[in-house]
């Protein structure tokens, strides 16, 4: 198989619009979980410690949080149909893509310094509409010339004139 075919298949699997998630962001990931015949939504909030292959259909993030003194990490495929939405709640200043050094730290040393950002603009994932191109034809363009309409008085006279019955049909009946 050629690379272009594989790229087309991968692009078909991509979501139309996703949030621009970076390392150091505190995110809330909502995921569908199947239990029996039903689906439920579960959220997981933590710090993104790693982002991989951002432009690919296999893009993923690793999110870490500490619960009851135990560190928990989950990896999410961004374009997966099971990932319902990703909301960025806080953005921090970091200087590297892989923040695995946070695993060994706890307390104040594990804190990241926040930076200002527009939360509404970052979390807006509306799909930009692409302009629709008109199909090009080889036929030359034809100009449409409008004919002048009849005066209103002439139209009214025609509407008022009753249709005369044919005298032959009246005699037979």
Image (cartoon, rainbow, N blue to C red):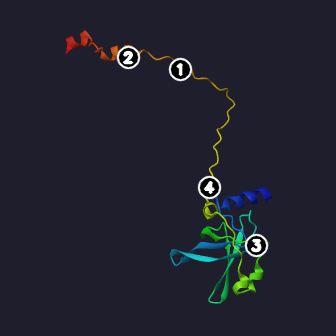
Disc 3: which residue:
94
Residues tagged 3 and 4 counted as in contact (Cβ below 8 A): no
The answer to whether mark 3 and mark 1 are in CB contact below 8 A is no
Mark 3 vs mark 1, CA separation in Å: 67 Å
Left or right of 172, for residue 66? right
Q: Nearer the viewer, residue 170 or 29?
A: 29
Q: Position of residue 105 (x, y in %)?
A: 74, 86
Front of the two marks 4 and 1: 4
Between disc 3 and disc 2, the foreground one is 3
Q: CA distance from mark 3 to mark 2?
A: 79 Å
- Asked if 162 appears above or below 62 in the picture, the reply is above
Q: Is residue 31 left or right of residue 59?
A: left
Cα distance, mark 2 to mark 1? Answer: 18 Å
- What residue lies at 69% left-to-right and 86% top-to-bottom? 107
Above or below residue 148? Residue 45 is below
Q: Earlier in the sequence, mark 4 or mark 2?
A: 4
Residue 132 percent coordinates (x, y): 63, 43
Distance of label 4 from label 2 (alpha carbons): 52 Å
- Compare marks 4 and 1 and give the one earlier in the sequence: 4
Number of residues whose C-alpha sits closer than 10 Å to that of mark 1, classed few (under 14), some (14–19) or many (20 or more): few
- Which callout, 3 or 4, points to the residue nearer the camera? 3
Task: Tell me the element at label 2.
Answer: helix
How packed mark 3 is, by other alpha carbons closer than 10 Å (few <14, some 14-19, many 20 or more), is some
Residue carrying label 4: 127
What quarter of the picture does the N terminus occupy?
bottom right
Instruction: Report helix, strand or loop for mark 3.
Output: loop
Q: Which residue is mark 2?
A: 155
């Amino acid at each position: 198989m050629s690379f272009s075919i594989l790229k087309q298949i991968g692009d078909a699997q991509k979501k139309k619009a996703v949030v621009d998630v970076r390392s150091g962001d505190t995110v809330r990931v909502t995921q569908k979980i199947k239990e029996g015949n039903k689906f439920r939504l579960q959220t997981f909030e933590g710090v993104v410690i790693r982002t991989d292959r951002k432009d690919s259909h296999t893009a993923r993030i690793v999110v870490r949080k500490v619960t009851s003194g135990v560190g928990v990490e989950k990896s999410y495929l961004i374009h997966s149909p099971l990932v319902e939405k990703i909301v960025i709640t806080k953005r921090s200043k970091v200087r590297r893509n892989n923040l695995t050094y946070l695993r060994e730290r706890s307390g104040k040393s594990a804190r990241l310094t926040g930076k200002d950002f527009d939360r509404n603009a970052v979390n807006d994932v509306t799909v930009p509409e692409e302009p629709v191109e008109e199909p090009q034809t080889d036929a030359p363009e034809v100009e449409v010339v409008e004919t002048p309409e009849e005066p209103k008085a002439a139209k009214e006279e025609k509407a008022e004139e009753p249709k005369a019955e044919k005298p032959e049909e009246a005699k037979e009946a």
